[in-house]
Amino acid sequence: MRLASLLPQEPALNAATLAQFANALKALNERAVPYLVGGAYALKHYCGINRDTKDVDLFVERSALDGALSALEDAGFRTEVVFSHWLAKAWVGDRFIDVIFGAGNGFGAVDRGWFEYSEPDVLLGVPVRICPAEETLCSKAFVMERERYDGADVNHLLLARGDRFDWERLIARFGEHARVLLSHLVLFGYAFPAERAKVPGWVMFDLCARVVAEGPDTADPPVCKGTFLSRQQYLVDIDRGCADARLPPVGTMTPEDVAVWTAAIGRVP
């Protein structure tokens, strides 16, 4: 018996909804709107893992958002910008397409590099391009909520593609957040001990050297970067006087972005 088959599954999308999603992709292609497919479909593309999902995740640059939403509206979807710093949705009935142009924590906006290294595929009979494996990993690495942790997705991307990664680009994507990448690589070696060679030795040495060289942060008040990992679990530390790293000068979110994103806890994925 395959153990994965025992897990509860999302209700399968019906043929009508799949046709509407296909029409959405066609509309974007016809308008020449630059977009990428990510989420569960990227995981299937890179890892061969099928995950039933109720939606489609599309990634666009912020400058292409208005054009993307206009094309989706013409395809019969109702659209709204849910969070001005990273997410819009296009609804058809109770199903939706996520149109993503950033990240909930304000780190990792979609840029031209995502498109440069994307890969071709076909989804619902429509030619599409898939978010690069490296950027997919980076976007998942910061999801560490109580109710959702994407570490297993990160590990499966490393398992499937680690020996083909553009490691220099991936490290550059993380930038000053190198500790987050290192933490996932350590856990990958724990989850798949026979596959540790998928991560080149120089990568581990480089990241460890970066971490050792950092030393303590002497900012006053002290900065809490935990809010990059969870929008809820470190709020107590902000209330106790720590500076929220999502805000300038460390992060890019505004106080209004943070307030709206926090108020939606428990209501919006």
Image: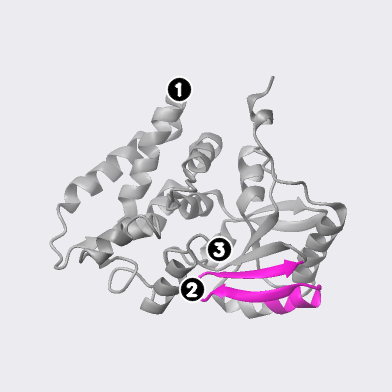
Return the mark for residue 85.
Answer: 2
Q: Report crowding for label 1: few under 14, some 14 to 19, many 20 or more residues within 10 A (C-alpha).
A: few
> Residue 254: x percent and y percent?
38, 77
Whether pointer 1 and pointer 2 mark residues with C-beta atoms closer than 8 Å, the reply is no
> Residue 206: x percent and y percent?
29, 44
Q: Residue at x 46, y 42 (%)?
A: 151
> Residue 194: x percent and y percent?
45, 22
Marks 1 and 3 sit apart, C-alpha to C-alpha, by 38 Å
Q: Amino acid at mark 2?
A: His
Return the mark for residue 169.
Answer: none
Q: Earlier in the sequence, mark 2 or mark 3?
A: 2
Asked where in the image residue 56 lies, by quadrant, the reply is bottom right
- Name the residue that disc number 1 marks: 194
Whether pointer 2 and pointer 3 mark residues with C-beta atoms closer than 8 Å, the reply is no
Return the mark for residue 268.
Answer: 3
Left or right: residue 5 versus residue 15 is: left
Q: What's drawn in magenta, residue-wise?
A: 69-92
Q: Amino acid at mark 1?
A: Ala
Q: Report crowding for label 3: few under 14, some 14 to 19, many 20 or more residues within 10 A (C-alpha).
A: few
